[in-house]
Image: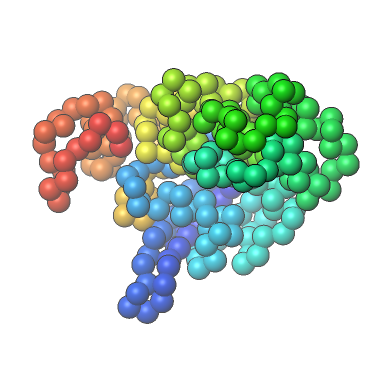
Amino acid sequence: MSALKFENLNVWFGDGRDRVNAVRNASFEVQQGESFGLVGESGSGKSTIMRALTGLVPTWSGRMEVNGKPLGTKRDRAFYKTVQMVFQDPYASLHPRHSVDHVLSETLHLHGFRDIEKRIERLLEDVGLGPSFRFRYPHQLSGGQRQRVAIARALAPEPSILLLDEPTSALDVSVQAEILNLLTDLRDEHDLTFLMVSHDLAVVGHMCSRIAVMKDGEIVEVMSVEDMRALSPEHPYTQHLLKASLGYFRDEEEPGGEPLTGTA
């Protein structure tokens, strides 16, 4: 059974002449225990799919399923015990006046857990932070440490599915690999399913087994990471992304006059 399933998903903002179709007829599945990547340029609709899934964008049509159960317009507590999200910016996702202890204990209380003390200690251990971090505030933490706290908060309800929205793009390069390796270890230890959004094909290649390539709100290709590494995509846009990520033809232009960049 699929952990996540999307069929003909359309997501839009606004109405009438002001309507913007952010995602159009997107269909793909993420198997249980899989790490699946959504890649594409900024504005292609990657993060919008995640936001529709979590209920942050209510204007959508089509079908979305979590563990075989179709989603409606509202998300209940059971959904958030199953699906949690790690956001891009660890500086913005933590309240500046809440300690690490407050962040984690509040989440655990909301989800009905009682043995709060032991769970906080275990969560901090899981993400590589010792007990000395428990009563620190965000301004006392580095970017990588903040993201570890954000990951601990996402793990607190014991979800089976984690949504990762560019989880390392706001971090220093030296810290990115540490967070990616932590996420890989956590997926193995907790039998998690990942849906990851990234513009960086190197990150996706490290983390994921399959990817969906998005352009202008549409999925143009679903492929395995092995095919990506073998440079054997079928769609011309995916070929351009791979060439850009490898640094080829940087002085040439894509159709439409936009220069290729070093990252997809």
The quadrant of the rendering that contains the C terminus is top left
Q: Nearer the viewer, residue 110 or 237?
A: 110
Is 42 placed left or right of 252 in the picture? right
Q: In which quarter of the view is residue 232 placed?
A: top left
Is 200 placed left or right of 93 in the picture? left
- Residue drawn at x 41%, y 72% is 14
- Residue drawn at x 37%, y 79% is 16
Q: Is 258 drawn above or below residue 202 in the view shown?
A: below
Please state the horizontal and vertical placement of residue 101, each as a whole percent of the image.
74, 36
Whether residue 212 is visible, yes or no, is yes
Is 18 placed left or right of 54 in the picture? left
Q: Which residue is the extreme one toward the bottom?
A: 16
- Residue drawn at x 72%, y 59% is 76
Q: Is 108 drawn above or below residue 205 in the view shown?
A: below
The coloring applied to the image is: rainbow
Q: In which quarter of the view is residue 137 placed?
A: top right
Please state the horizontal and vertical placement of residue 165, each as a whole percent of the image.
49, 42
Please state the horizontal and vertical placement of residue 255, each as a whole percent of the image.
15, 47
Please state the horizontal and vertical placement of residue 105, each as a whole percent of the image.
77, 41
Q: Nearer the viewer, residue 145 or 81?
A: 145
- Residue drawn at x 34%, y 47% is 42
Whether residue 189 is visible, yes or no, is no
Q: Nearer the viewer, residue 136 or 92?
A: 136
Q: Is 129 drawn above or below residue 257 in the view shown?
A: above
The quadrant of the rendering that contains the N terminus is top right
Looking at the rendered structure, the number of numbered marks drawn on it comes to: 0
Q: In which quarter of the view is residue 84 placed?
A: top right
